[in-house]
Image: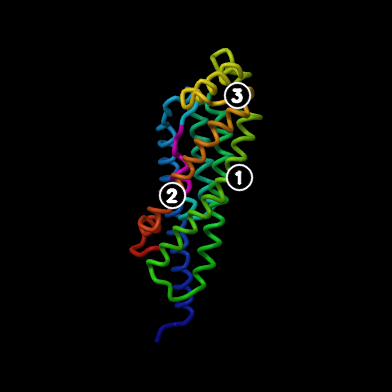
Amino acid sequence: MQNKDTNVFDRDSTSVNRKDKHTTRVAISIIAFTAISFVMRYFSLKIPFMPSFISIEFSVFPELIATIAYGPIIGATVCLLKTAIHIGIVETALISDISSLLVELVFVLTAGIYYRNTILGTRKRKNKSKNKSNIHRRTAIIKGGFLGIIPALIIQFLMANFFVFPMFDKYYGKYGYSFDKMLLAFNDALHRISSNAPQLKAMWQGILAINIPLSFIKLTLVVLITALIYPAISPYLHFKKHSK
């Protein structure tokens, strides 16, 4: 007959091992997603007819995946690590990276918190089929993502208007990033798109006309792609055969 005390110790040991294994897996996932996000930071796309200082990169995509899979804190950690590494390697990226970091944090935290609360609430219900569960998860990702886009774009506008472009003008004005030249580039871009485009007279108008719409399109694509693929990759992200 087995000693009950021994069984207790065995259960405690098993519990500790599970926690250690979980911690190790999360740490590996953070490193992996940070590396992917960092690499994607370098694959920026130049948009035809847009000013040379305007580009789109999708490093927020793995950050959102990490947020959905492991929670808002992990997603935020990936954002912070990616930005810290990039700033450490590319010193001139400090201004734009600080702004991008705030935008990304607001986006992934809002989306992640909504998703987490929605899914945790759903798990209390029983008899949900796998297909319905996947549909519900996709819906939660889309709703949370679009909720995150709104404050993210507000933060982006404020940072671009009151921090990024003023700092560019101050420190890089002699290299072609003065207010006058950047505003001229905004106007040229708009008039290439439409000859009837109004003349922009202030930087905030250029930000609203070009930066914000491009960011909206980028974040929308990120949300929709995440919603499409996440249920399929979830088992691999959680190191098990069945969906989370």
Q: Which residue is mark 2?
A: 224
Q: Residues within 10 Å of mark 1 (few under 14, many from 20)?
A: some
Magenta residues?
A: 56-64
Q: Amino acid at mark 3?
A: Leu
Q: Which of marks 1 and 2 precedes in the sequence?
A: 1
At a point 40% along the width and 41% down the height, the residue shown is: 36
Q: In screen coordinates, is 60 left or right of 233?
A: right
User: In what element is the residue under mark 2?
Assistant: helix
Q: Amino acid at mark 2?
A: Leu
The image quadrant where one finds the C terminus is bottom left
User: Please, what is the three-letter code of the amino acid marked with disc 1?
Assistant: Pro
Name of the residue lying farthest toward the front: 196
Q: Nearer the viewer, residue 105 or 85?
A: 105
Q: Quote the CA–CA distance across marks 2 and 1.
A: 18 Å
The image shows residue 39 at horizontal and vertical percentages of 40, 36
* Camera-nearest residue between 77 and 199: 199
Does the magenta portion include 60?
yes
Q: Nearer the viewer, mark 3 or mark 2?
A: 3
Q: Which residue is mark 1?
A: 151
Lower position in the chain sequence, tag 3 or tag 2: 3
| Label 3: element kind | loop
Q: Is residue 174 left or right of residue 123?
A: right
Count residues near mark 3 (Cα–Cα under 10 Å), then give few for <14, some for 14-19, many for 20+.
Answer: some
Q: Residue furthest top?
A: 174
Where is residue 45 drawn, in percent x and y? 41, 31
- Is 145 on the left or on the right of 228, as rendered? right
Return the disc, 3 or 1, that comes first in the chain's sequence.
Answer: 1
Tell me how many marks there are.
Answer: 3
Q: Residue furthest right?
A: 162
Write down the residue under mark 3: 200
